Structure formats: structure tokens, C-alpha cells
Amino acid sequence: MGDNEDVWKPLSITEIQNIFSQIPVQWWIAGGWALDIYLQKITRAHVDIDIVMLRPDHLILQRHLGRDWEMFIAYKGQLIPWNKNQLLDSHFDNFWVKKKDESTWAFQVMLLDTEEKDWIYKRDNTIRKPIEDIG
């Protein structure tokens, strides 16, 4: 598993918007692309594109992408097939997505843990922020 250019052929921001606008979940662009969108300029080349979404919505996403896309859980340096309707435990918070029958990854999704209306930082659950303020 590696973030090198040979394994990633990321979708564009517009392509991500087109896919996710059809799915009834909250989602956000994250990582380097999020910074560039905020700055309104491209600051560097991007090997991948990161999406964040709320953990409770991950099966909704899987159902909507299931026909055309393959999803693999990224965990401790391994890619594990994500089985249909498999609820992801809290230690699984990251998965990679690629078109069926393609060898390159299109985007990465990271799951955000929540409690009521708050996002919870995964490395320190005392750090929280209202979900409505994270986008």
C-alpha cells in the first residue's frame, strides 16, 4: 500500500462533486485539495484526493457506489476488501475506492466519528467540534 503516482489516478474535484451530489450523505474534500480550495490556488501536485464523511453514513455510500466501484479498507498497511453491507468498526476509518476492473485508485474516504451533533477527533476524543462548523 502506498501513496505513489503509479497506484493513484485521482478524480478531479468536479468528478467527485458529480458523484457525491447524487448520494444523500454529508461529505467534505480534505487534505491538500481542501487547503488549495480554501486558498483558491493550487499549491502543489496532488497524488490523491481525500474525502471525509460521517461514519454513520458509510453504508449509504457503499450502496450508492456498489455497482460501479470497488472499496477496500486501508488498515495498518493492508488493503482489505470491504464486503457488501459490512459495518466498519471504529478502528476502520479509511478506505480506498477504484472503478471496477481498473487498477488505479480514484479517491480515498476517511470516516469521521461523531457523538450527537459533534465531530470527535480520532486521536484525542476530548477534542470536539460541532459538525455544522467543520465544513
Image (cartoon, rainbow, N blue to C red):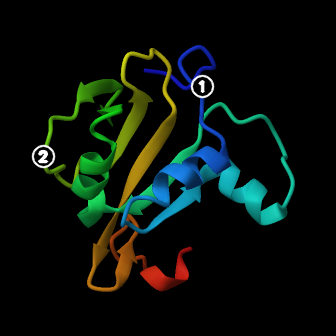
Quadrant (top left/top right/bottom left/bottom right) for the C terminus: bottom right
Q: Which of 73 and 59 lies nearest the eye of the viewer? A: 59
Image coordinates of residue 35 in percent, x first then y, are 72, 58
Q: Amino acid at mark 2?
A: Asn
Does residue 111 lie above or below 2 as drawn? below
Is residue 125 among the parts visible in the rendering?
Answer: yes
Query: For the point 27% across and 47% down, which residue is it?
Result: 62
Q: Which of 52 and 11 lies nearest the eye of the viewer? A: 11
Residue occupied by mark 2: 85
Image coordinates of residue 132 in percent, x first then y, are 48, 84
Q: Is residue 122 left or right of residue 89?
A: right
The tally of labels here is 2
Does residue 102 lie above or below 26 as drawn? above
Residue occupied by mark 1: 9
Residue 109 shows which numbered tag? none
Query: For the point 29% across and 35% down, which residue is it?
Result: 67
Disc 1 to disc 2, C-alpha distance: 26 Å
Q: Amino acid at mark 1?
A: Lys
Q: Secondary structure at mark 1?
A: loop
Does residue 83 lie above or below 128 as drawn? above
Query: For the point 53% across and 75% down, which residue is it?
Result: 134
Residue 40 falls in image quadrant: bottom right
Residue 22 falls in image quadrant: bottom left
